Amino acid sequence: MTDGPAITRLTAGDLPAAAPALAALLLDAVDDGASVGFTASLTSEQAAAWWASLAPALTDGRVVLWAAHDGDRLIGTVQLGCETSPNGRHRAEIAKLLVHRAARGRGTARRLLSTAEEFARTDGRTLLMLDTQTGSAAEKLYRTAGWTPLGTVPDYAADPSGTLRPTTFFHKSLLVPGA
């Protein structure tokens, strides 16, 4: 008996086989109204091409990608964008935390987030950043997972229907107090 979905790190070599499932996951998020960088006109082919475009960043370590599987079914994903500039190697950004609608409510998003945070910590990152649509379920997740809101920017990003929505920016320190 497992305590949730299997979470594995994906490499650039995994993308060709995983692209259809990743594309379906992204389409599900967009269809559900998630403001994750795409509009409702997103096609399966465009979604698969977007995932494939991550290959160079996965190869050189600028992006780390994890997938959550329930058996053979991909049900979630999260990315960690690792800053590479000399003055920013202590920070990274959480992006595209997606969980399929049919698999929500089981702690998958929290496990994916925790996986990315722990990797960042062991990679020497001490500061994480992210942004999410204000008022979304994701915002609630980040607040309850110990993330600190920095502020909200009105009309920052369009939702899938094209309506501009506010975005809340968060940060999380990975420094251990007293260390």
Image (cartoon, rainbow, N blue to C red):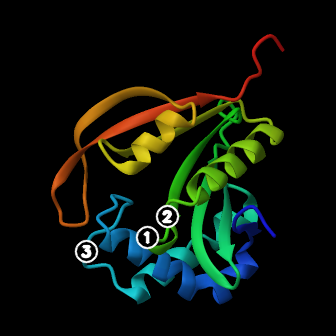
SS for callout 1: helix
Give me the disc on residue 40: 3
Residue to which mark 2 is pinned = 104
Per the image, the residue denoted by label 1 is: 101
Residue appearing at x 33%, y 58% in the figure: 35
Residue type, label 1 = Arg
* Disc 3 element: loop
- Asked whether, in this view, residue 102 is left or right of residue 175, the answer is left
Q: Mark 1 or 3, which is nearer the eye?
A: 1
The residues tagged by marks 2 and 3 sit, at their Cα atoms, a distance apart of 21 Å
Image position of 54 (left or right of 28): right
> Residues under labels 1 and 2: Cα distance?
5 Å
Between 61 and 167, the residue placed more toward the observer is 167
| CB within 8 Å, label 1 to label 2 | yes
Is residue 132 found left or right of 141 in the rendered image? left
CA gap, disc 1 and disc 3? 16 Å
Which badge, 1 or 3, comes first in the chain's sequence? Answer: 3
Residue for point 74% across, 72% down:
11
Expressed as whole percent of the image width and height from the top left, the position of residue 62 reads 67, 55
Q: Where, by quadrant of the figure, is residue 28 drawn?
A: bottom left
